[in-house]
Amino acid sequence: MAKQKHITSIGGSAVIEGVMMRGPRDIATAVRKPDGEIVVDKKPLNPLVTKYHVNKIPIVRGIFSFFDSMITSVKALMFSAEFFETEEENTKPSKFEAFLERKFGDKLKDMVIYFSVLLSLVLSIALFILLPNYIVGFFKDKVEGNLLKNLIEGIIRIAIFIGYILIVSKQQDIKRVFMYHGAEHKTIFCYENDLELTVENVKKQPRLHPRCGTSFLILVMLISVIFFSFISWDNLATRFLMRIALLPIVAGLS
């Protein structure tokens, strides 16, 4: 008789030489140091949806969960990076770094995290939302109907996304992170199948997981085709602003 699958909300992400796993109450990050030692950092989790009591509000909780996931991932990534900065430790801080240290003190790390999340969002919006719309704008008069225009825009968006993944995967460091990403998927599958978490059992699991963040991004792109169909194509600024305004709703619904 086949074992019943574990129903779990455990997810995670790859970091530098390691993985981060996030459950309903705790978060753990495991990193393989240059000397081979594996360091595990486990902390209690205080999700934004619980902190601000929005866990029962559809779409809104999705928006909070999206930002919470980004912040958690950046924190885990910065934790893993600390073990690979030995060459820079003896370098004298620049005047700008010293100014930031004096200005923000202990809050500097949090400022870096929030700035990283903001920068990631800005670049992602520019590359995957605004650029495809700008490209379609060149031949919008030759295409009838907003739905068809948005369908073409969606195809271009997904093509840019796949191209981006293929390009960055050629870098050795990123390729290594992708390998840990696959290992994270296999581990979650192993846990969901109620198997003992051993290397042998994990190796047998599929590499692609339906709850992967990449699947979420593709879902966002598909849903955006429908939502953006209600936006007029007459004015470039209006198209850009409305897409940015609707993005949190699209992400929250996804």
Image: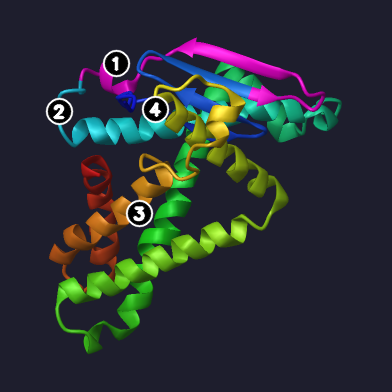
The amino acid type of the residue labelled 3 equals: Ile
Q: Nearer the viewer, mark 3 or mark 1?
A: 3
Q: CA distance from mark 2 to mark 4?
A: 30 Å
- Residue 12 rendering spot, x and y as whole percentages: 46, 30
Q: Quadrant of the C terminus?
A: top left
Residue 234 is at least partly visible in this image: no
Q: For the residue carrying disc 3, how many other residues have a C-alpha within 10 Å: few (<14), some (14-19), or many (20+)?
A: some
Does residue 52 appear left or right of residue 202 in this picture? left
Mark 2 lies on a secondary structure that is loop
The amino acid type of the residue labelled 2 equals: Ile
Q: Residue at x 44, y 53 (%)?
A: 124
Q: Nearer the viewer, residue 230 or 91?
A: 230
Determine which residue is flagged by label 3. 218
Highlighted magenta segment, given as a residue range = 31-53
Q: Is residue 58 above or below residue 152?
A: above
Q: Residue at x 14, y 28 (%)?
A: 57
Mark 4 lies on a secondary structure that is loop
The amino acid type of the residue labelled 1 equals: Lys
Q: Residue at x 71, y 50 (%)?
A: 172
